Amino acid sequence: MTAPLGGWRLESWSYVYEDGRPPEFPMGADAQGYILYTPAGQVSATIMRADKSECFAYAGRYELAEGMVFHIIELSTDPGLVGFRSTRHIRLDGDRLTLSGPDFRPGTKRTQQIVWRRAADRTPITSP
């Protein structure tokens, strides 16, 4: 599998529970965010509540293997995640990227599902 290089805008971030209860949206159903993958193997993700009252972000390296991406977190707004290796299954359907996998916290009996849409290409803004 090739890397999902470039920028992706958040469509949704949800917790999906094993017991079948409705999903929860940790930053709200209308959260905003980006994830960026570079050709050199860096990843950076930022998700913010729509009212801008709370933000979650991390950055680090990524590795690809067998339909999965592993994020090795080096910086985070949650210090407990520094050094964590996150496992996400990748589903790429056109310009939609779905990452799903275990919660950051073991024992929660839930998975995370994060859906992104490829960000529009834009010409960089230059200073006069």
Image: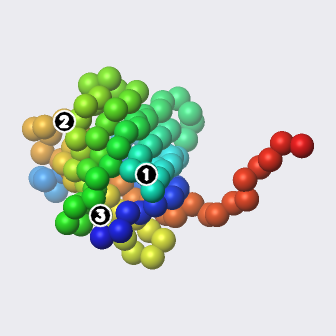
Disc 1 residue type (three-letter): Ala
Question: Does residue 14 appear in this view?
Answer: no
Q: Residues within 10 Å of mark 2 (few under 14, many from 20)?
A: few
What's under tag 2, amino acid-wise? Arg
Q: Which of the 4 image quadrants contains residue 115? A: bottom left
Does 85 appear above or below 66?
above
**Cα separation between marks 1 and 3:** 19 Å
SS class of the residue under badge 1?
loop
Residue 51, placed above or below residue 92? above
Name the mark nearer the viewer: 1 or 3.
1
Residues at circles 2 and 3 in contact by the CB criterion of under 8 Å: no
Q: Between marks 1 and 2, how big is the CA–CA gap? A: 28 Å
Determine the residue positioned at 25% across, 31% down: 83
Q: Can I make out residue 119 in this image?
A: yes
Category of crowding for the residue at label 3, using alpha-carbon neighbours closer than 10 angstroms: few (below 14), some (14–19), many (at least 20): some
Residue 66: where, in percent of width, then height?
A: 20, 66
The quarter of the image holding the N terminus is bottom left
Residue marked by disc 2 = 105
Discs 1, 3 touching: Cβ within 8 Å? no
- Which of pointers 2 and 3 indicates the residue nearer the eye? 3
* Mark toward the start of the polypeptide (1 vs 3): 1
The residue that label 1 is drawn on is: 40
* Amino acid, disc 3: Ile
What x and y, as percent, mark residue 3? Answer: 38, 63
**In terms of secondary structure, where does tag 2 sit?**
loop
Q: Nearer the viewer, mark 1 or mark 2?
A: 1
Q: Please determine whether, in this image, residue 8 is positioned above or below residue 58.
A: below
Q: Nearer the viewer, residue 74 or 18?
A: 74
First along the sequence among labels 2 and 3: 3
Dividing the picture into quarters, in which one does residue 78 lie?
Answer: top left
Residue pictured at 41% horizontal, 63% vertical: 4
Location of mark 3 (residue): 90
